[in-house]
Amino acid sequence: MPTPSARPKLHRRYTPFVFAFYMAGIMAFLMCCTIVAANTGFDSGYVRRVFSAYALAMPVAFFCVMMVRPLVLKLVALTVHTH
């Protein structure tokens, strides 16, 4: 089995896209879990409903993260010392 450092990696120019993909995936999943539970509760169909909602939420979340990224970077620069 290859060590983690031996695995192929993407070039760093793809960092914004990879970050957006992971951020959108995790946040969409957590929000789907929460909203489905709040709207319909926990029962035998909970997991199916979560993944059904996630199928729509993930691409929307990815697009949204990519769209607001420049604004967020500016807000962070206004808020955080860089030195």
Image (cartoon, grey):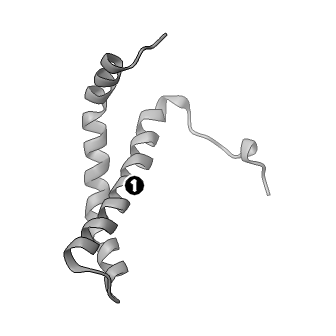
Answer with the quarter of the image where residue 32 lies.
bottom left
Residue 37 as seen in the image, left or right of residue 22: left
Whole-percent x, y for residue 25 in the image:
39, 54
How many marks on residues?
1
Q: Kindly give the residue lying farthest to the top in the view shown.
A: 83
Is 81 in front, or is 50? Answer: 81
Q: Kindly give the residue lying farthest to the left in the view shown.
A: 39
Say few, some or many: other residues with alpha carbon within 10 Å of mark 1 (under 14 / 14 to 19 / 20 or more).
Answer: some
Answer with the quarter of the image where residue 43 lies.
bottom left
* Residue position marked by numbered label 1 in the rendering: 25
Tell me which residue sits at (80%, 58%) in the image. Answer: 1
The residue tagged with tag 1: helix, strand or loop? helix
Whole-percent x, y for residue 40 in the image:
22, 79
Tell me which residue sits at (70%, 46%) in the image. Answer: 7
Q: On screen, 68 above or below 60?
A: above
Residue 4 as seen in the image, left or right of residue 67: right
Residue 50 as seen in the image, left or right of residue 2: left
Q: On screen, 50 above or below 30?
A: below
Tell me which residue sits at (34%, 72%) in the image. Answer: 51
Whole-percent x, y for residue 66 in the image:
30, 38
Q: Kindly give the residue lying farthest to the bottom in the view shown.
A: 44
Q: Amino acid at mark 1?
A: Gly
Is 81 in front, or is 18? Answer: 81
Whole-percent x, y for residue 31 in the image:
31, 60
